[in-house]
Amino acid sequence: MSFEDAKKEVVELYHDKIIKFLLETVFQPEKSKAFGSDMILSYDLNRLSNTIAYKRIVHGLAYKHIDTEGFGGRSCQIFSKERLELINQQFKVVNKYIRHTGKYFSPSGGYDSYTGEYDYDPGGLKNIKTHIILELQHNSMTYYIGESYLKIEACNVEKIHEGNS
C-alpha cells in the first residue's frame, strides 16, 4: 500500500468523523451577530476538507494506517501496481535508478574488555537483491503517478531502438 492509497482509504473511512472533530474544535460555528440570535453560521463542508488542519489529520492517520498494515519496518521491498492500459505503449527513458531490497539488520558491536579491541558490525541488508528502476515519459504525453513520471522495473520493459529515418 502506498502512502497516497493510505490517505485515500483514511478519507473514505474517517471523512465524516474528521469533519465533525474539526467543527467541534478548530472551526466552531459562530453565532450570527447580525441578527442577534442563536442562528448558527454553517461552514461549507466541502471547503473544510481542503483546509490545512483536515489535510494534516488525514496525513497523520495515514501514517498510522500504513504502520498497522505493516508498511515500513525491517523489510525493504518494492511495491508495484499493474497498469494494463500501458501494455504495448512506447515510452522514453528519462532517468534510471538502482534500488536494493532485503531484510534490514541493526548495527552491533562494542568494546571487548578481554582483548581490548572494538568489534563493530555496521547495519545493512541481508539477502540483497538489486533492482533497476526506470523513469519513463510517454512518447505523446506523460503518464503521471502523483507528481512524478511513471516508474517501472527494467525487467518488465522491452527495449526498442529507434532508427535515424
Image (cartoon, helix red, strand yellow):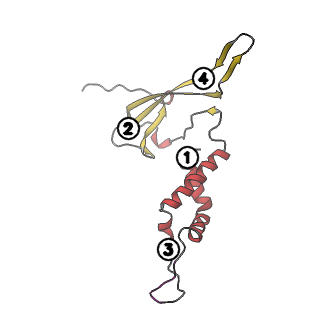
Tag 2 residue:
137
Other-residue count near label 2 (Cα within 10 Å), few / some / many at <14 / 14–19 / ≥20: many
- Magenta range is 30-35
Other-residue count near label 3 (Cα within 10 Å), few / some / many at <14 / 14–19 / ≥20: few
Query: Which amino acid type corresponds to the residue marked 3 in the rendered image?
Result: Tyr
Tag 4 residue:
128
Of the 4 image quadrants, the one containing the C terminus is top left
Task: Answer with mark 3 or mark 4, whichever residue precedes in sequence.
Answer: 3
**Residues at marks 1 and 4, CA–CA distance in whole angstroms:** 24 Å
Against 128, residue 56 (above or below) is: below
Tag 1 residue:
3
Against 20, residue 104 (above or below) is: above
Q: Secondary structure at mark 4?
A: strand
Task: Answer with mark 2 or mark 1, whichever residue precedes in sequence.
Answer: 1
**Residues at marks 4 and 2, CA–CA distance in whole angstroms:** 29 Å
Q: Secondary structure at mark 2?
A: strand
Mark 1 in CB contact with mark 4 (< 8 angstroms): no
Q: Closer to us: mark 4 or mark 2?
A: 4
Residue sitting farthest toward the right? 114
Mark 4 in CB contact with mark 2 (< 8 angstroms): no
Query: Which amino acid type corresponds to the residue marked 2 in the rendered image?
Result: Gln
**Residues at marks 2 and 1, CA–CA distance in whole angstroms:** 23 Å
